[in-house]
Amino acid sequence: TNKNFNYNVNFSLSYDVPFVQGLSLKLNYGLSQAATNTEQIMMPQLLYQATKIAAAGQHLFSETADKDWKATNNTANSRVTYDNTTSKNEQSNFFVNYTRSFGDHNISAMVSVEKATNELEDRYQIYDNPTAGIYNGTSVSAGTLNTGNTITYKYESGSLSYLGRASYNYKHKYLLDFVFRTDASTVFAPENYWGFFPGLS
């Protein structure tokens, strides 16, 4: 049995500053959350085996007498497994944009801040040897907890970025463009969180 629930939302807000021509602000926010609940059940199987199938006149099951059947409770791989995972991802962006023309001269610029966070939690449990007819969907009735394969895993990460662009062109023929981005991420060691990446064309 798998139960999944997730949603994604995105918000955006823009504002043109009225007293500064060409200046605008923009804010973006995105959120994604998900939850998955999985339950796997393998109960013991009651198997019947004909004990005299190799004897003369006993090769067909229809010829086997009731007393020549052996019942076996097969518990191989009998278990109840729970796996519950939740995740949350957020990202925010704030932009300042400026675009203006002065005769043959055209300029535009943008600066931005970006922040992102990610969280994940996974709870995994195995219960061995559940009893048929007793299990009612709860861990109390699921059997014996297998401590060797029961784990809880948590993960967190985040990033922070500053970026920008400044552009100038003269009569749309001669172009100058400068871009930069500086990033910090938890996937790197603390002394190497930040990186700076400029470009000029």
Image (tube, helix red, strand yellow):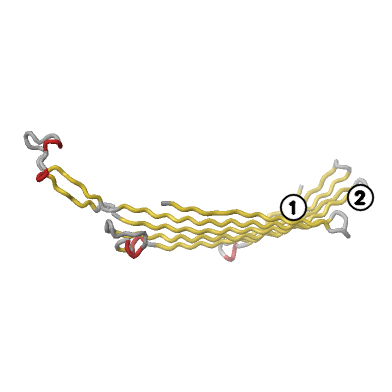
The amino acid beneath tag 1 is Val
Q: Is residue 56 above or below residue 186?
A: above
- Residue 173 left/right relative to 117: right
Q: Is residue 70 left or right of residue 11?
A: left
| Pointer 2 local density, CA inside 10 Å: few below 14, some 14–19, many at least 20 | few
Q: Which mark is residue 179?
A: 1
Please provide percent x and percent y for residue 52: 9, 41
At which x and y percent is residue 62? 14, 36
Q: Residue 10, percent across and down?
A: 66, 54
Residue at screen point 79% across, 55% down: 97
Residue at image coords 45%, 62%:
153
Is residue 1 depicted above or below 151 in this figure? above
Viewer-closest of 165 and 175? 165
Q: Toward the viewer: 129 or 3?
A: 3
Identify the residue shown where x is 87% and y is 58%.
18
| Residue in the picture at 50% in, 57% down | 35
Between circles 1 and 2, the one closer to the viewer is 2
Residue tagged 2: 102
Secondary structure at numbered mark 1? strand
Residue 163 quadrant: bottom right
Q: Which residue lies most toward the right here? A: 103
Residue 182 is left or right of residue 119, and the answer is: right
User: Residue type at mark 2?
Assistant: Phe
